[in-house]
Image (cartoon, rainbow, N blue to C red):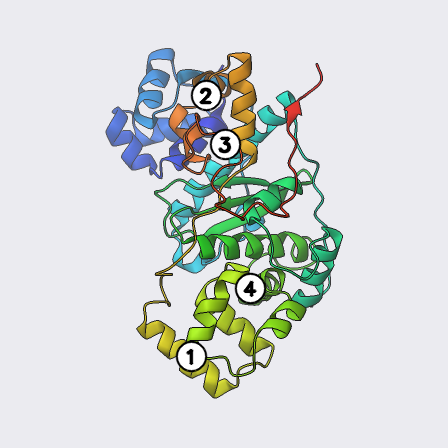
Amino acid sequence: MVTPSRIRLARERRALTLARLSALTGISQQSLSNYENARTAPTGPTLGRIAEALGFPVGFFSADEVEEVASEAVAFRARTKTSMRKQKAVRSQAALAIEFNDWLTAHFALPAPNVPTYGRPSPEDCAETVRALWELGDTAAPNMVHLLEAQGIRVFSLDTEHHEVDAFGFWRDSVPYVFLNTAKSGERGRFDCAHELGHLVMHGDERPLSGPEAEREANRFASAFLMPRADVVGRMPAGAQVDQILKAKSIWRVSAMALTHRLHDLELLTDWQYRSTCRQLAEMGYRTAEPDGIARETSQLLPKVFSLLRGRGTTPGRVAEELSIPLSELNSLMFGLSFTSRPGRGGGPGRDRGRPALRVVPAPR
């Protein structure tokens, strides 16, 4: 029996219109619309043509009903600049990630979510409260992907085709999710993690998840979370010069521009000094990139999971088969990691100090 919602999800995952899918399959748009809306069901050969055109196994279309990720549940960083077709494509990828997480939860004991939600309007206070809850002290945050995973946030990567989507996050059934664009710099990736954490903590049923004010609040949260007030004030002089900023940004592993914004917020740079510094940094190439940047932070949980699976004789291909998805869809969620990589690598010398321990064990049978 065919599940209509899965035809729509697979089509939207490929960012195809009904007209385009009709051209690829030779099936009329009306028939395709009927299949997606459960008015009629495709025959076996017809379903095969649809599956081939969309690059999904035939079995995908007969699995259980899939619940789509609603547009209002997702905090797209630049919603107005992201086409509706692209938004649907990334939301479809998120729906597949939720199914993957359900599979993981059935097979492994993953960290339970430990993410508070506050209706308070002060991002600075929220950031300080979360840091205290997670016992981070007043020093630089550790590997952000590892930190979020250790606190029960399910972190996945976005397909490389979605380069215009920085990151997004949402709650589903009391489980927090964050999706990251891995094409960004290491510093930008850390800020994206903290930004999406801010949305999870501050925005939800009581307050809007998206919009200019929500984005500003999430940015302020991220800045305060990555660069604690006491640490920055204790280390940085008032009126810091560009060379001092470039040297100090490695302390918190943030971009030069992010540190400059934080210094201005903390009144360590005057308005004139802030504008002058931003102009100098832009001329040096730091507005759109980080010429001397850090390595991109990546998952700790997923390599551990697949290491345990290898010990059971279960390959990634087998996992994809059980989920009835192409292996490429599973790979797209994995931060570009090799399944043969050792768990926990990639932080660089001294980067793992103080990071939260992450324990993943097989679920009891």
In three-dimensional space, the C-alpha distance between marks 4 and 3, rounded to whole angstroms, equals 28 Å
Residue behind mark 1: 277
Q: Mark number for residue 316?
A: 2
* Contact check, label 1 and label 2, Cβ < 8 Å: no
The mark nearer the N terminus, 2 or 4, is 4
Q: Is residue 117 left or right of residue 181?
A: right
Report helix, strand or loop for mark 1. Answer: helix
The amino acid on which the numbered mark 4 sits, given as a three-letter code, is: Asn
Count of numbered marks: 4
* Contact check, label 4 and label 3, Cβ < 8 Å: no
The mark nearer the N terminus, 1 or 4, is 4
In this view, the residue in front, 182 or 37, is: 182
Residue behind mark 3: 96
Q: Is residue 320 left or right of residue 161?
A: right
- Tell me the crowding category of disc 3: few under 14, some 14 to 19, or many 20 or more residues within 10 angstroms, Cα based: many
The amino acid on which the numbered mark 1 sits, given as a three-letter code, is: Thr
Above-or-below relation of 11 to 286: above
- Tell me the crowding category of disc 1: few under 14, some 14 to 19, or many 20 or more residues within 10 angstroms, Cα based: many
The mark nearer the N terminus, 1 or 2, is 1
The amino acid on which the numbered mark 3 sits, given as a three-letter code, is: Leu
The mark nearer the N terminus, 3 or 1, is 3
